[in-house]
């Protein structure tokens, strides 16, 4: 009899982007950050709900050279329960729309690897630096290295994983895998197709991203393409918030919550619909 992994959930945060309110003229400019209260609320929610892990899908700060922004990000991140892993993803504000060898060096010095993977309860998760996918013109060798990593990692792990899920900052597309190129909105087709071929080959369950500061949902066959709203400065109609993602043996469920509407518990259900655990 095959063992079925227990259901679990994780929390996706995106675009805390300390300094964005000020950059958009929506902060007093007195050295304080409106992002502070929002990110603290998100971290406190994680501590209360106790997810399997928390992932931040990029744009950690507005200005990668601003030490005050970086310090505030790290101060609040350190408030997360040490039993809950925190996984960081790089965004364009962290390394640039066209990353350079220097911007990548600085990011890696501060945060560690920008392309990596991990496993939890029979599922495999892969984290990519999507700025390299967006425009590797200054670091073409980084794109080659990223593709080699994706191929070897998924070949090694996906065949034995119940779900394969990718985290990156930029979406692969908006509504369709055939979407035309559109500036820095999502990954250009020539590199999108390379990543999609690997995700399709390994029957990935979903790609979770941010970047837009609002929610948007699409798919490629059975693979979810999720663009999540921001912890920080919101655009469009979606408030600052977080996403709760439930991972079951046969499906993935997800829901976005504004900071003023966060749940007190997260209920996971068994395959036959009975509550299996409550956090």
Image: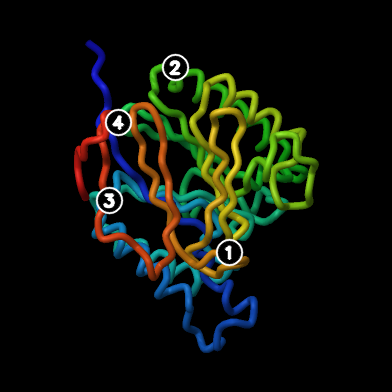
Give left or right: position of 5 versus 204.
Answer: left
User: Hey, which quadrant is residue 75 in on the image?
Assistant: bottom left
N-terminal label among 3 and 1: 1
> Which one is in front, 250 or 134?
250
Q: Any mark on residue 18, and which?
A: none
Please, what secondary structure does the residue beneath circle 4 have? Answer: loop
Name the residue tied to disc 1.
64
Q: Residues within 10 Å of mark 4 (few under 14, many from 20)?
A: some
N-terminal label among 2 and 4: 4
Closer to the eye: label 2 or 3: 3
> Which one is in front, 177 or 170?
177
> Does the CB distance between marks 3 and 4 fall below 8 Å?
no
Give the distance between the C-alpha atoms of the residues marked 2 and 4, in whole angstroms.
14 Å
Give left or right: position of 210 versus 53.
Answer: right
> Which one is in front, 103 or 243?
243
Closer to the eye: label 3 or 4: 3
Name the residue tied to disc 4.
121
Looking at the rendered image, the quarter that the N terminus falls into is: top left
Q: What residue is at 58 percent from the left and 46 percent from the top?
A: 217
Give the distance between the C-alpha atoms of the residues marked 3 and 1, in whole angstroms.
34 Å
Name the residue tied to disc 3.
266
């Amino acid at each position: 009899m095959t063992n079925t992994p227990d259901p679990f959930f994780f929390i996706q945060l995106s675009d805390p982007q300390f300094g964005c309110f000020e950059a958009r003229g929506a902060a007093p400019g007195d050295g304080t950050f409106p992002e502070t209260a929002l990110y603290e609320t998100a971290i406190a929610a994680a501590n209360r709900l106790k997810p399997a892990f928390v992932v931040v899908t990029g744009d950690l700060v507005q200005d990668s050279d601003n030490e005050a922004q970086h310090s505030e990000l790290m101060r609040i991140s350190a408030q997360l329960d040490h039993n809950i892993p925190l996984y960081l993803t790089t965004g364009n504000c962290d390394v640039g729309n066209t990353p350079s060898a220097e911007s990548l060096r600085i990011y890696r010095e501060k945060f560690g690897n920008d392309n990596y993977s991990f496993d939890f309860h029979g599922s495999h998760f892969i984290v990519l630096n999507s700025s390299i996918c967006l425009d590797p013109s200054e670091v073409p060798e980084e794109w080659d290295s990223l593709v080699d990593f994706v191929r070897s990692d998924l070949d090694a792990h996906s065949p034995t994983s119940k779900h394969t899920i990718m985290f990156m900052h930029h979406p692969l597309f908006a509504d369709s895998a055939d979407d035309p190129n559109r500036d820095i909105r999502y990954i250009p087709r020539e590199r999108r197709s390379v990543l999609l071929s690997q995700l399709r080959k390994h029957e990935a369950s979903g790609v979770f991203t941010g970047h837009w500061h609002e929610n948007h949902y699409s798919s490629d066959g059975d693979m979810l393409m999720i663009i999540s709203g921001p912890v920080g400065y919101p655009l469009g109609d979606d408030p600052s918030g977080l996403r709760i993602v439930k991972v079951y043996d046969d499906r993935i469920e997800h829901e976005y919550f504004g900071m003023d509407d966060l749940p007190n518990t997260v209920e996971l259900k068994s395959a036959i619909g009975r509550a299996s655990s409550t956090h």
